[in-house]
Image (cartoon, grey):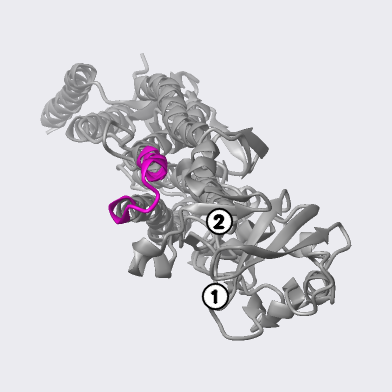
Amino acid sequence: MPTTSSFSGLNIARGGLNASQVMVDVASKNIANAEDSHYTRQRAVSASIPYRTSQNKWHFEISGGVKNVDIERIHDQFVFDRHRKSLTSQEEAGFLKDKLKHISNYFPEVDGFGISNELDNYFSAWSNLITNPSESANKVVLAASADRLAETIKFLRRNIKDFQSSMDKEIEVYANEINEMTKEIAHINSEIFRAAEKQEQVNSITPVNELRDRRDELELAIAKLVNIEVDRGVFESNSASTESITETGADYVLSVSGFTLVDGTRHDKIAARSSSSTDSFVDLKYIRSDHREFNMNKAISSGKIGAIFDLRGTVLNNKKDGFEDGIIQSYLDDLDSFAKTIIEKTNSIYSGTRADKLRSNKPVFNDIQRTIVQKVREINEGSFFIQTFDLNEKLIGRKEIFIDAQTSIKDVMDQINSNSDDNNDSAPSNDVDDLFVAKIIDDAFYIESKGVSGRYKISINDNGTNFAGALGLNRFFDGNDARNIQLSLPLQTNPEIISPYYHNENGKELIANKMSQLKYEHIDFETREGNVKTTLGDFLTRMITQVSSDGAIAIDDFETKDTVARQIKAEFQAIGKVSVDEELIDLIRFQAGYSANAKVISTIDEMLDTVLGLKR
C-alpha cells in the first residue's frame, strides 16, 4: 500500500517549523514594543501550500504544508487619516487657548490696576482742576495722571506687540522642523521602494513595517504644526489577508493646500522669510525645486502654525507696521483707536487755550493741493475759528475757516492769510492775517506770529472739523496712537503752564468742564468691523471684554476638539495597539506549534533510522 514519502513529511514539518518560528519572532517583537505609542502591532500571515498529485501509478495527493506570505501591520489607514486630521485641529485649538490665556494676563483690570483705572484717574484730575484752576499742585497731579495713562497704554501695546512679534521665531523653528521631517519621510519612501523592488521574502522579520510606523509618526508630528493631505497612491489588498491594505510603490505625496512637500523620494522645503528688508514680520514661503517662492500664509488653515497666523495675522500692512487680519492685531488696532481718540479729542479741546504759535505733529503735507479730508481722514467737513488775543487775554481777532470735500491745506492757508476785516472795525493791523501767518515747513503745518513772538496769543475754537485735534495743534498729548502717546514735552517739563481756560467769543471758561464732559461723550471709534459710537470708558470695556470672550471661546473650542481627538485616537489604538496578554497567549500557541513540528521531524528521523537499520 503506498505511503506518503518521509521526505515530503520532512518538508512539510520544516515549513511548519519556519512558519512557527516567524510567528514566535513577531509575537516577541510585539511584546518588546508594547510601550511604544507609535508601534503598530504586526501579525505573521500564513497560508497552506496547494496539494499536488503524485506522478506514480497510484496518483495519490500530497499535502504542501504551510508557508508565510506576509507580515502585516494591524493598521486601518482610513482611521489613521481621521486621527491625523483630528490631531491637527486639537493642536490648533490648544495653541490658541494657551496663547489667548497668556494675552489676557496683560489686562489686569482689577481695582487699582489697568487702563480703566488710569482713565478714571485722568478725568478725576481734570475735575479737581475745576475747584482751583490756578493751583499748581492740581496741575502737577493732572500732568502725572496723563503721563501714567499714556505710559500704561504704551506698556500694554509693547507687551502685545512683542508677543505678536515673538511668534515669528516659532514659525522659523516649526518650518525647520517640518523640513527635517519631510526629508526623513522622503528617505523612508526610498527605503520602502527599494524593499518592494527586491521583493523581500517574509521568512524573517523585515524593517518595512517599522519604516511605515516611523513615517506615520512623522506625519502626526507634521500634522500638529500644519494641515496636511497625504496620498499614498495605489492601494492593494493582500489576498491572503483582506485586513492588510497598504500602498505599493513610491507614489506617496504629502502636501499642504496644494503645496507639495514630499513627492515619493523627493522633498521641497519651506522657509520663514521677510518679503523685503523693511518688513518686521516673516511670511511662510514654499520653495519649489526651481527656487521660485510662494507665500503660504493663507494656505495654512490649522495646526500650530495655522493658530499663529490666526493670532498674528497673514496679510502685512506696512503703513501701520501690522496686519490687516489676526486676533492679536485686532487688539492692537482697538488699542490704537482708543489712544488716538483720546489724543485727538483732548487736543481738539485743548487747542482752545492760548498759545504763542501752532504746529502740527504730523508731517503729512507733501502735497498741499490734495484734498485735506482725503489726506487726513480724521478731519471732517465744517468750520473752525482762528482767535487772537493780546497779553491781557482780550480777544482781538476772530476768523472763520471753512472746510469741505474739495478743500486742500493750501486753501486753508489762503483763508487764514487772506486780507480781511475780522473785527468789522476797519482797523488795518489787528486782524488775524496782520498778526499771524500760516505756512508749511518740512511738510508740517504752522501758524506763527508775524511780529515779536509772545506779544500776541492764538487759539482755535473748533466747530466739528476736528482740524486742530487731528493735526495736533497746541496739543496736550503728543503722538498719534498707542505706540507713541505721551504728555506733550512742554507740559512734561513744566506742568504749571497747563492752561485751565478755554477761550471763545463770549470770553473764557474752565477747560476742565469740557474735559469732564468728554468722559461721557459718545464718540466714533474706528474698528475692523466698522465705526463704533460709544464713550471712552465703554470702548475700553468692550476691548477688555473681547479679550476675555476670545479666551473663553478658545477654551470651549479646545475642549470639544480635544474630546473628539481622544475618541478617534482610542479608536485607532484599539486596532493596532499591542495587548501583552493577547501576545503572550499567541506566543504560547506558536511555541506549541513549533514544538509539534519539531516533534514530527524528530519522529520521522527516528523512523528513518529504524528503516535504515533494518536494511543493514
In the rendered image, which residue does mark 1 sit on?
Answer: 278
- In percent of width and height, residue 173 lies at 38, 59
- Quadrant position of the N terminus in the picture: top left
Q: Residue type at mark 1: give it.
A: Thr
Side of 122 where 233 appears, left or right: right
The stretch in magenta equals 120-138
- In percent of width and height, residue 269 lies at 51, 64
The image shows residue 6, relative to residue 382, as above or below, that is above
- Residue 55, visible in the rendered structure: no
In what element is the residue under mark 2?
helix
Report the residue at 76% width, 52% height from top: 380
In what element is the residue under mark 1?
loop
Residue 50: numbered disc: none
Q: Quadrant of residue 322?
A: bottom right
Q: Nearer the viewer, residue 133 or 351?
A: 133
Report the residue at 19% width, 30% height from top: 31
- Quadrant position of the C terminus in the picture: top left
In the rendered image, which residue does mark 2 sit on?
Answer: 347
Report the residue at 62% width, 61% height from top: 317
Q: Quadrant of residue 590?
A: top left
